[in-house]
Image: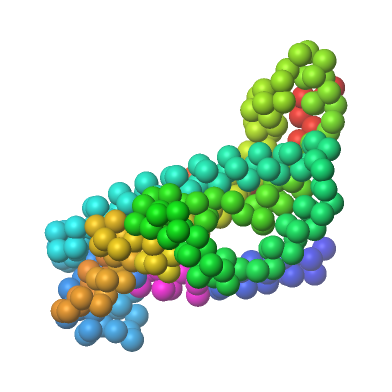
Amino acid sequence: MKGITVIRLLKYIVLIAFAILFLFPTVWMFVSSTKTVAEISAEIGSIQSFIPNFSNMQNWLVPYQEMFSRFNFSIHFFNSVFYTFIIVLGSLLVNSLAGYALAVFDVPFKKFITSALIILIIFPFQSVFIQIFIIINQWNLTNTVWGLALPHIGSAFYIYLFMVFFQKIPNELRESAYIDGASNWKIFTKIVVPISKPIFMTIGILVFVGAWNDYVWPLMVFTEESKYPLSVAVNIMNETKPAYLNQVMAGLTVTTIPILLIYILGQKYITPQNSSSGIK
């Protein structure tokens, strides 16, 4: 019994050590965003660079104020929120419906489609950048929200995840709903979706992080700087002379906070749930 306790304690120590190690860059980023450039340069390489200057708390927001006024950061923040909302909503709707159809209905060439999904997962989105851009350009969708969103909405990986999850839902739930006269759409929206919160939340978070942090594709699609999302705006800020490190760190902090909030708020849903709930 003592041996098991010691092993568990060692595991906790190792996990805490790794957590602290991975948190160091985030802590340094946040702390640096509250200091002046002179303070960052003087404290670099020391433990003091991870400790906020509590004697100068009234000036913590100065880098943020300068960043928003200098680069119109509020516009880029709104762009990121709007683009990400469209991509997450579209991705959850399209991929869940496709996964549900493959999991439940007798779709023609079902085995071929499933095999094709697995093969497509192997190829990253970056490998077909040029081909997709040519298509988007031919459809006159460059410099538009749809040109940015459409390539991200459909995903073989997310369709496959939805399909695997929906296959585990007992047929008795759908059969009882059919007997009561429910349509396929009603069964999906009223029965399947409510008991599938874990997979919707998991994929939603993955899509959110990918869309929020996307840099190359928005840079290719948009030609107007006012339409750039945060990811591109922060890079422009870093390349604009003079570049102030505290303002860059403030921009990165603003970019990081929504991801942390989404994960914290959605974490309780990313847990195994009994998909057979409702069956007596």
In this rendered view, identify the residue nearer to me: 82 or 196. 82
Number of dots carrying numbers: 0
Q: Position of residue 92 (x, y in %)?
A: 58, 43
Question: From where the camera sits, is residue 43 visible?
Answer: yes
Q: Residue at x 17, y 73 (%)?
A: 36
Q: Residue furthest front?
A: 138
Q: Position of residue 119 (x, y in %)?
A: 74, 64
Image quarter hosting the C terminus: top right
In this image, 88 relative to 35: left or right? Answer: right
In this image, 218 relative to 263: left or right? Answer: left
In this rendered view, identify the residue nearer to me: 58 or 114. 114
Q: Which residues are magenta?
A: 21-28
Quadrant of res 177: top right
Quadrant of res 176: top right
Image quarter hosting the N terminus: bottom right
In this rendered view, identify the residue nearer to me: 273 or 103. 103
Q: Residue at x 27, y 71 (%)?
A: 236
Vertical side of 173 occupied by 85: above or below = below
Vertical side of 172 occupied by 268: above or below = below
Q: Position of residue 141 (x, y in %)?
A: 40, 54
Q: Residue at x 61, y 68 (%)?
A: 124
